[in-house]
Amino acid sequence: MPVERGLKIATIGGGSSYTPEIIEGFIKRYAELPVKDLYLVDIEAGKWKLEIVGQLARRMVKEAGVDINIHLTLDRREAIKDADFVTTQFRVGLLEARIRDEKIPLRYNCIGQKTTGAGGMAKALRTIPVILDIAKDMAELAPDAWLINFTNPSGIITEAVSKYTDIKVLGLCNVPIVMEKMTAEILETAADKLRMDFVGLNHLVWGRAAYLNGENKINEVITKLASGNFRGVKNIPDYEWGTDLLNSVGMLPCPYHRYYYLTDLMLKEEIKAARNEGTRGEVVKKLEASLFELYKNEDLKVKPKELEERGGQYYSDAACDLISAIYNDKGTIHYVNVKNNGTVNCLPNDSVIERTSYVGKNGATPLNSDPLPSQIKGLLQVVNEYETLTIEAGVHGDYNAAFQALTIHPLVESSIVKDLLADIISENIDYLPQFKVNN
Amino acid sequence: MPVERGLKIATIGGGSSYTPEIIEGFIKRYAELPVKDLYLVDIEAGKWKLEIVGQLARRMVKEAGVDINIHLTLDRREAIKDADFVTTQFRVGLLEARIRDEKIPLRYNCIGQKTTGAGGMAKALRTIPVILDIAKDMAELAPDAWLINFTNPSGIITEAVSKYTDIKVLGLCNVPIVMEKMTAEILETAADKLRMDFVGLNHLVWGRAAYLNGENKINEVITKLASGNFRGVKNIPDYEWGTDLLNSVGMLPCPYHRYYYLTDLMLKEEIKAARNEGTRGEVVKKLEASLFELYKNEDLKVKPKELEERGGQYYSDAACDLISAIYNDKGTIHYVNVKNNGTVNCLPNDSVIERTSYVGKNGATPLNSDPLPSQIKGLLQVVNEYETLTIEAGVHGDYNAAFQALTIHPLVESSIVKDLLADIISENIDYLPQFKVNN
Amino acid sequence: MPVERGLKIATIGGGSSYTPEIIEGFIKRYAELPVKDLYLVDIEAGKWKLEIVGQLARRMVKEAGVDINIHLTLDRREAIKDADFVTTQFRVGLLEARIRDEKIPLRYNCIGQKTTGAGGMAKALRTIPVILDIAKDMAELAPDAWLINFTNPSGIITEAVSKYTDIKVLGLCNVPIVMEKMTAEILETAADKLRMDFVGLNHLVWGRAAYLNGENKINEVITKLASGNFRGVKNIPDYEWGTDLLNSVGMLPCPYHRYYYLTDLMLKEEIKAARNEGTRGEVVKKLEASLFELYKNEDLKVKPKELEERGGQYYSDAACDLISAIYNDKGTIHYVNVKNNGTVNCLPNDSVIERTSYVGKNGATPLNSDPLPSQIKGLLQVVNEYETLTIEAGVHGDYNAAFQALTIHPLVESSIVKDLLADIISENIDYLPQFKVNN
Amino acid sequence: MPVERGLKIATIGGGSSYTPEIIEGFIKRYAELPVKDLYLVDIEAGKWKLEIVGQLARRMVKEAGVDINIHLTLDRREAIKDADFVTTQFRVGLLEARIRDEKIPLRYNCIGQKTTGAGGMAKALRTIPVILDIAKDMAELAPDAWLINFTNPSGIITEAVSKYTDIKVLGLCNVPIVMEKMTAEILETAADKLRMDFVGLNHLVWGRAAYLNGENKINEVITKLASGNFRGVKNIPDYEWGTDLLNSVGMLPCPYHRYYYLTDLMLKEEIKAARNEGTRGEVVKKLEASLFELYKNEDLKVKPKELEERGGQYYSDAACDLISAIYNDKGTIHYVNVKNNGTVNCLPNDSVIERTSYVGKNGATPLNSDPLPSQIKGLLQVVNEYETLTIEAGVHGDYNAAFQALTIHPLVESSIVKDLLADIISENIDYLPQFKVNN
Ligand SMILES: [Mn+2]
Ligand SMILES: [Mn+2]
Ligand SMILES: [Mn+2]
Ligand SMILES: [Mn+2]
């Protein structure tokens, strides 16, 4: 890493409303992570957002008195060239596509969610061609750079890069860190006193252990959670798990497990929302509009409180801490999406898992996982095969793989697959070049 | 095997309406499989059926002119003592229990079926204590005997015996042989010219290859099946799979796959049937009543045609052929439920799988299976873990295991699990001693 | 397989002194295996042998009154074109090379043997480029043909073809069939009454079970063997195993295990032989010379008794039975070298193992193997990795792989590796094009 | 861990000449690791040494001004009761036994070494009954304590405890830390700037990567090592590896690899030493005598320089750092012997491996290891099976397991096994109660 010339970071999808989060993250860590050049990249359609959020970013660094050059560009290759880290937070097809991902499945009484189930598959199919393109640019222009992927479905996207390119890649999600903070609250301790054993796939991760002062407190966490008032991430309504479910799982489910464990309740909630305030995507769309209004205010020089409503808390912390752990060769524990390579024996070596990992300048090494108990093993395995099929479909435009991906997904009733998939492909066809070619 | 004293077979659940099938099977094979003593065993509640069917059996062997002694008894231990083969075709709780297995899930808009999903789990929970008892008797009274298990869910029951006893056991089902016959029809050839590669779990088995004269014709089978008129087993309504589904699976699904691939259609059909002619169990109950009326006729000396309506075609062929292959050390291929032991690498060694196996006097050795493709691997894995949990629940009365078994089952929507399981346990409690003790 | 035009077989290395064996095999099985055209192929240097043995072959078929056309050719491609089976029994570098394989290791007080250890590696390095060439011809000229490989080291050569080509290949060795015959003798029964469970690698295979009438008699075999007069294959001096060794292995070692279990005795024997009658290769060379003298006799019209001295008994039976089982879709058990694919869980999927397999027109499917006990597992694993490295060395001319292959081989003391390997490469360099290029 | 009452450590084999090392270690770390009570335990035969070294220990802590109570006792149970850590550095049969372990194999021209090969097996057989006894005491008297095992063969002993007891155990060896220090020297950096990727078994461990500032420098290490003057641990003569060996391994061998990679050279050295200055055990015996003379000196109040000659450098650092990492929940990397559990996929789950691990109060979690390359995989697997067999022999007195353990060990020529094993058992019979019972 040619540090002499200063640390260069390229953020693809830099026009995102989240960008002030990551700017704040870099500002807070400037002493240990002295970013010299931050390239915010977006596409033509996002140019106006890039301009607004980019100006805010500039005001923020100026206000903070740190020497970070904010570059705004539509030229991805310029941004990637010689970067040390490339972070991705882009959304192919913008919020409109997300809203489709939510609404198409609902037509079939099927969970419509941006990362889980049919909606997540649609998003993956749109995103895979773009991320492979980015990886290709990186191979050419910044072969030593790390790709830190936030783009959802984070595990699948990271796995596609891991399987089909030689780029150094890690996937990131705020779910584990959110779960850790909640665990800390439940145990009435500080998150940094905890060491969590997370294992699973992105958005299907379980907290298998919560070590506090060397003792695994997971049973206490479950008991307290079962009896009361745990609050999930902002994106997901806050249903109770139920004591029997929690006790029989024996570990901490992630918020997205509600789609698996409380399917009907979640579906009803989604249908109700769609009929009233709109899907989460539609709500976010309004929220984003008002955020960009806020961002335009030239007196705004810090991340506005309102951004917290947006979801994605701690994303910036997770990301900046990970980047700093790599940059500074810290040897600390992070919860990342990383190539399995036998860590979880019942999943293929080339799958990407979400796992407690040890991070230094050479990257993330997952801590080995003890063999999994049946109640999480089977679910993980079937969702993992769904992911494998989705990646095949996304990379090769393989209709059969897409068909089977939906068929075996636990949240998709099989008799709807043909029509559902037809809708997904036809309504996203502008973003699915791989399916244009093959079908 | 002390052949000198003549071949002894004990059939537990001998009062079943199926018994004439197996009697016919032994008669047809008498030359190669000279059964001397056939013990038909039943319990007090089944005594009247045992008497009727037992007398028919006696008339059948007399008519056929073969020297098989038919013993009718309620003393299971007498029947098992020194037996060469013990076959099981009993039903704990009789047809009433089966009808409950069908109806309880339907209350929750959930597939209600005697072997698949929640109903199958209930049946397994009732059956496991009894089969382990039988195995215990065998260990004491006939330690060298083979247990040939027909009792459903055949794979789970066989696995429980395999995991928790040292008895030699093989599980049997007519589904593979029915699929083979259909494949032969589709290819316009004879079944004995085919060699099928079956792999999976009982009632979740795929025909991965169909070798005719050395060539794998499975694609031709699928294409013809997709275009037309395949007929499933009698127990299951005859929906079309759909071309895309068949092509994307790339192998032959078993009839029970309809529950997984056409869930809603099957559910609607079940609901309709329950409201009209009754569940399959209720239909069978009437059918059985009329069968036993038929059996009473002293002029009836052969298996009546009407039995074919009952379902379970070829059961007798599958069973008698398997017993003969063992007895005669044949070295032929059979499709049986057998300990995995690495045959299917992505399933645990101690799981019982349904697999093309080589059979001789030393038992069945599964032919190794090539690694499975994603579309069947994930589904198999999650159902296998459901089975593992069900066995733990059945053996130890482990409520948490039962809860998670239903939670991860692809056919059970998770938010109903608590109530559904409460109904299953309370309404079957007379047959669930393991749950009486533990809860 | 275009049977209409008659069965065509190409035998590469047709000038071998073994050829009368295989001719006799085809003659004996003519009714079930009606070979129309048998192409005996050799190279210029073997032309004189091809002529002699080819004329004998013609006299043999004429005498037997079967209608097999014997073609003698140096044009390998003509022989392979449209063949149904290609069998390989060639020896790159002729007997001179074999003698080198025996003598070079002896310089270092290291076992010198044509298939096992350093000599076997040398032979593999010479043979791999040629077999891959043959496979390339087959892919072009006879893509549906089966390659039945006899060329030693049979397992390694078969694995090289399996890993680096798409040709249908099975490896064959007479060792299992010899062991089966001996087991039958020990049990005073006929070999066809036995069913053997062989597992391992070629020339490192164990008889794990010997089923006679359904009962595993392996302990009886071992006990009798330990107490007495078992005789090995002709190539290997006949040392006693010792009771403790046999009992602690608990299964039947193959004759080549003497190199592993009685290393020093074998080495001393080899050294003595080299000083006196010559190495086995040198003895064979003389034997072959006298065989070819015999073969020249125009009155000789059958396989001469003297050929039995040569070693390789039953090779012809093993080969012709296997070819007939494929051709006639027999569904019988054979002991072949076949892709592992999980059969033996503790070895990689892509390794070739020697295993009891079920054979029909679609090829050989290995019977699944129960997990291996420690005493054979570790030895198999290290030799398997030696084989893997040897194949890498043979295909890519990878010096490091060759160095480590010898280093980890249990029969090669590591400090001699550098010099030993230098000798092997330099003295075989005419047959090692892959090493000429790379080094 | 009841810290309120002060940290209690029990050291079994406390009369060892190494004890001043560990005392020094505790003194240096007193601030972070405030040991209150240190129990040095020995047996009657070691009482005189315990007295001498114990007095020195007391003088050392007094001189250092730290408040550690040194207890000297022959009552192991008193020492273990409520201990926080139990460390083991005992030697069953004293140095006399070690000398036998070295000399018996030499009779057969076989490597005689205290931990590797036949000598190591003998030591394991003697030690296993004692360590299981200690574990039993711990289960009763200090069930929450950690067993930190130094007793050799450290991996095998740790694995025996791990397989046959529920005690929390970690095995320790100074080899990895010695290799790390050397790597640091070679790279002209400080050891604490390096992060090593160690993988293997105790005394058969490879340095697969050496990360310096995020870059894997292992190739540079190997190149420099190949070209020059690396120095091994004191116990092992200092032969050169050779460039080709190092390059083809592609990673850093441990000093004990010389027995595998340079077998004959090591054997010759051992034979020469035995004839001259004596085996290493005999040398150590003299060294120890003079050390104890030194220790008696009441003016000696610190660890004497002469102890460094003894071998085992950094043992104390490895041990005290590990104990402190656990005690203080540090979350740091240590190189320990720990249950595999899938970390190294090609070894059984229940094997104990030596691996870079993440250590906190909850113990050591191995970092997952990427699949191993062939050159180390095969060797590891066969030695691992040797270890498995040795443990079975050690626990159950299983002669067959012992016989096969030696038979498959790469350093033991098989034809000597029977006599060698007879000598080992008969000459150690006083320490082999398990073999007295069974044979
Ligand atoms: Mn996420
Ligand atoms: Mn069935
Ligand atoms: Mn051979
Ligand atoms: Mn050590």
Image (tube, coloured by chain):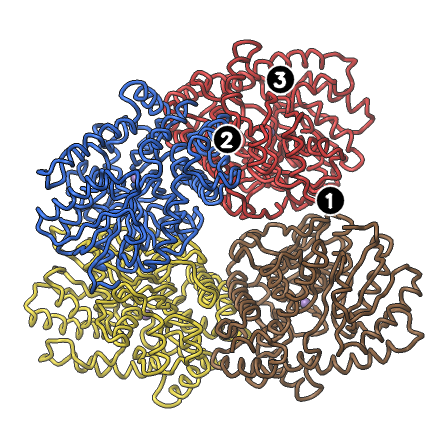
Chain colours: A yellow, B brown, C red, D blue
Instruction: Name the residue nearer the viewer: A353 or C240.
Output: C240
Q: Which residue is mark 2?
A: C128
Name the front one of labels 3 and 2.
2
The number of callouts visible is 3
Single out the residue that lies furthest toward the left.
A65
Question: The disc labelled 2 sits on which kind of residue?
Answer: Ile
Residue C47, numbered label: 3
Sequence-wise first label, 3 or 2: 3
Give the image quadrant in which the ligand numbered 2 is located.
bottom right
Name above or below for residue D325 compared with residue C238: below
- Residue appearing at x 41%, y 75% in the figure: A246
Q: Quadrant of residue A436?
A: bottom left
Question: The disc labelled 3 sits on which kind of residue?
Answer: Lys
Q: Position of residue D395 (x, y in %)?
A: 46, 45
CA distance for labels 2 and 1:
31 Å
Question: The disc labelled 1 sits on which kind of residue?
Answer: Lys
Sequence-wise first label, 2 or 1: 2
Name above or below for residue D235 compared with residue C217: above
CA distance for labels 1 and 3:
36 Å
D319 left or right, relative to A262: left
